[in-house]
Image (cartoon, rainbow, N blue to C red):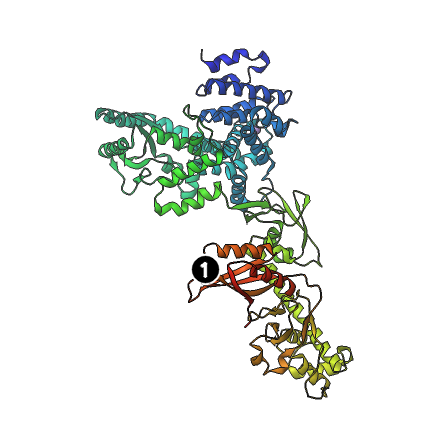
């Protein structure tokens, strides 16, 4: 008696007769120590489900045991089998994930937990158009492919026992199986499970069609049996004769694929089942081609039907030769030729990479395994279809996207890393602009929270709310970023309006008037004269420097007041350093707080602040009405760029030394440029650094000047 079978004798009577004996019979391929763990997991599961029964009246534990059996048929590793025995424990019993992790380790607990998370998704009320998104969401939620394999096995057993459920449930679950689970099994290449899911799904979704078709197919098959026997013997014997070890199987199309072909091609049953299928299994890919040659000499091939999936494997790694022959009496014969290994991959797909191998010593993390699988099939792909491949397999298994539900159940796809704000903008720009809070699975979360696969996201909006400029720092979608920026741009107009109003009021006050003192009629006629719609437009233009406040004042008052020299006097505008959008600082002279400054009204840019010592001033002085007096407000809370140049001894490490010194002085370097001098031992280093004001700058310069490598240092000014 082998070890697996002997284990049963140690179990109490109450734990027998649940199908576990059958399972033990299937897992003889595992190592004894792994079998012990499986028995332990069975005990754990049986205890957790104690007293629970299925719809059919059977003990609940029979279900996990059967699911484990399906995975054992695929020869999956012991972790998968162990997890299968406990897969409904978290959901159905109070036992926590922590307990499983404690007793069986993180890896197995992770698989069980992954399955429980998938169970929480429900597709009931979702629109049909979203089926594809839902499948992707499921795959995206899973970090370990074994979770999907387990989920597929779970679904398969539920389908096998569906008869015990009420009819309406049967129909819903069967439909879901055809829509969601069978396509996933197909995509992962787990054909055994896929075929069974489809047959059962078909049976319960369209019971009547299924019965009629089944009857008709059985009848034709009965008639064909002898012919099938004859053809397969002929193929097999001929291969034997030339020394190719082979097995030839007559192949039956399963009902659902016959049904679908009839629908798709609008053909009658006879036209479809009149096709005989054979599978030839040989020992090497060389033999595959030789067997192909043999078949082509026995029966004439149908032109254009030969496909070489060994040279160019299918997207999921499927390899085989396909050909169609003209059999006795002109009956088409479909033949698949492959090796045993190819057959194993064809039947189990991605599961083949999770199969137990006694030689597997080290533990390979699940993601790496999945990547290996992916890599192995990428290498098999020709360059021609690799793009398509990426689209289908890679995108699903290693998704760059997250899939979430709206409160109404619509599935939204967003790039990985998206936050609640991205979600809000994806729903609608207005929702984004008005969002104030977010809920994930009905719990309030900060707006910057990243959204997770499979959750339901709800956005709370308020009519008066506006985008927060800080969102720009964390949103990841182009739409969200664009929308926030767009809002800020509009805000810039608002800021320009405010500045324009201030400028105009100031100019008016200098002239002994004010905006309030201008009558409505007067303002309206001036606006008409200037071709503007309203005062806001006027303010905005003034703020952006397109209209000059003193000139507008002159027009408004008709008799402007002047000083003795004829120049308009105005008191300076205070600069706080926060008017980023409407006040900028000249790059020629880099003014900083403490410098004497002047403002120049520039069309479209608002006020550009220059130092009064700036060399460019003489040119600008020719347009006196564009000048505006400005001064610094006290206590400015920001940093300004300023340019300094140091003449230094050109030796290794000098730059690093100075840079370090600048850093020590609480200043940051924005840019550095180096210019070699004629005299080779010296170089000019120019730094653009950030300082708070003149006092701060003086401190930085002092500290640099004290360095031995520095010959000279000064602030630059155009
Ligand atoms: Mn289950």
Q: Residue 511 location in percent, x, y? A: 74, 83
SS label for mark 1: loop
| Residue at horizontal 45 percent and vertical 30 percent from the top | 354
Residue highlighted by disc 1: 650
Q: Residue furthest front?
A: 708
Residue 479 coordinates in the image, percent (x, y): 56, 57
Closer to the camera in the image, 133 or 532: 532
x, y percent for residue 369: 45, 34
Looking at the image, the residue that sits furthest to the right is: 517
Task: Please tell me which residue is depicted at 56% across the width and 21% down the height of the picture.
Answer: 41
Against 679, residue 602 (above or below) is: below
| 50 sits to left or right of 73 | right
Dot 1: few (<14), some (14–19), or many (≥20) neighbours within 10 Å? some
- 388 or 661: nearer the viewer: 661
Is residue 170 visible in the rendered image? The answer is no
User: With 706 as the anchor, is 502 left or right in this view?
Assistant: right
Quarter location, residue 560:
bottom right
Asked if ligand 1 lies within 8 A of label 1, the reply is no
Residue 45, compared with residue 513, is above or below; it is above
How far across and down, in percent of the image, does residue 216 sit? 42, 31
Q: Which quadrant, please, contains the N terminus?
A: top left
Residue 15 is left or right of residue 437, and the answer is left
């Amino acid at each position: 008696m082998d070890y697996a079978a002997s284990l049963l004798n140690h179990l109490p009577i109450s734990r027998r007769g649940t199908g576990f004996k059958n399972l033990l019979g299937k897992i003889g391929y595992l190592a004894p120590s792994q079998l012990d763990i499986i028995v332990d997991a069975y005990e754990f599961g049986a205890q957790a489900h104690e007293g629970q029964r299925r719809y059919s009246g059977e003990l609940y534990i029979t279900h996990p045991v059967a699911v484990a059996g399906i995975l054992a048929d695929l020869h999956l590793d012991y972790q998968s089998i162990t997890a299968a025995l406990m897969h409904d424990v978290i959901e159905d019993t109070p036992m926590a994930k922590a307990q499983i992790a404690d007793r069986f380790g993180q890896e197995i607990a992770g698989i069980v937990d992954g399955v429980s998370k998938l169970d929480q998704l429900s597709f009931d009320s979702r629109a049909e158009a979203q089926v594809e998104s839902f499948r992707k969401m499921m795959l995206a939620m899973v970090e370990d492919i074994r979770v999907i394999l387990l989920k597929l096995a779970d679904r398969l057993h539920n389908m096998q026992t569906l008869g015990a459920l009420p009819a309406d449930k049967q129909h819903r679950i069967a439909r879901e199986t055809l829509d969601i689970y069978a396509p996933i099994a197909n995509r992962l290449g787990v054909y055994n499970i896929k075929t069974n899911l489809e047959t059962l799904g078909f049976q319960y979704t369209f019971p009547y069609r299924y019965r009629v078709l089944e009857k008709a197919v059985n009848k034709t098959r009965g008639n064909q049996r002898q012919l099938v026997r004859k053809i397969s013997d002929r193929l097999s014997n001929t291969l034997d004769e030339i020394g190719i070890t082979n097995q030839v199987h007559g192949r039956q199309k399963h009902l659902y694929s016959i049904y679908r072909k009839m629908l798709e091609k609008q053909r009658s049953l006879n036209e479809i089942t009149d096709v005989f299928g054979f599978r030839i299994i040989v020992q090497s890919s060389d033999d595959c081609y030789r067997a192909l040659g043999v078949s082509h000499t026995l029966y004439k091939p149908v032109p254009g039907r030969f496909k070489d999936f060994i040279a160019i494997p299918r997207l999921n790694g499927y390899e085989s030769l396909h050909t169609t022959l003209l059999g006795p009496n002109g009956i088409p014969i479909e033949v698949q030729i492959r090796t045993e290994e190819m057959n194993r991959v064809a039947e189990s797909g991605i599961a083949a990479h999770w199969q137990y191998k006694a030689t597997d010593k080290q533990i390979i993390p699940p993601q790496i395994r999945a990547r290996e699988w992916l890599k192995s099939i990428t290498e098999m792909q020709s360059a021609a279809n690799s793009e398509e491949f990426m689209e289908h397999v890679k995108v699903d298994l290693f998704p760059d996207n997250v899939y979430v539900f709206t409160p109404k159940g619509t599935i939204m796809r967003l790039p990985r890393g998206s936050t609640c704000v991205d979600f809000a903008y994806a729903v609608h720009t207005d929702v984004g602009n008005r969002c104030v809070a977010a809920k994930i699975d009905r719990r309030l979360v900060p707006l910057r929270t990243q959204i997770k696969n499979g959750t339901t996201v709800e956005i709370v909006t308020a009519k008066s709310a506006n985008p927060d400029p800080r969102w720009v720092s964390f949103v990841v979608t182009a739409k969200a970023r664009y929308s926030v920026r767009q809002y800020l741009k509009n805000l810039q107009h608002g800021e320009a309006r405010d500045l324009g109003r201030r400028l105009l009021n100031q100019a008016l006050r200098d002239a002994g008037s004010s905006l309030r003192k201008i009558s409505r009629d007067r303002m309206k006629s001036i606006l008409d004269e200037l071709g503007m719609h309203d005062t806001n437009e006027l303010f905005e233009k003034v703020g952006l420097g397109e209209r000059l406040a003193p000139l507008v004042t002159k027009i408004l008052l008709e008799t402007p007041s002047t000083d003795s020299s004829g120049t308009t006097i105005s008191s300076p505008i205070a600069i706080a350093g926060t008017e980023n959008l409407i006040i900028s600082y000249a790059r020629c002279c880099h003014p900083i707080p403490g410098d004497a400054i002047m403002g120049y009204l520039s069309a479209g840019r608002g006020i550009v602040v220059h130092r009064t010592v700036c060399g460019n001033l003489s040119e600008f002085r020719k347009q006196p009405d564009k000048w505006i007096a400005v001064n610094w407000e006290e206590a400015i809370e920001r940093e300004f760029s300023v340019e300094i140049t140091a003449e230094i001894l050109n030796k290794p490490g000098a730059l690093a030394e100075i840079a370090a010194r600048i850093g020590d002085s609480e200043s940051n370097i924005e840019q550095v440029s180096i210019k070699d001098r004629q005299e080779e031992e010296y170089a000019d280093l120019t730094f653009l650094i950030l300082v708070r004001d003149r006092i701060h700058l003086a401190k930085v310069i002092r500290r640099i000047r004290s360095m031995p490598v520095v010959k000279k240092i000064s602030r630059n000014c155009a």
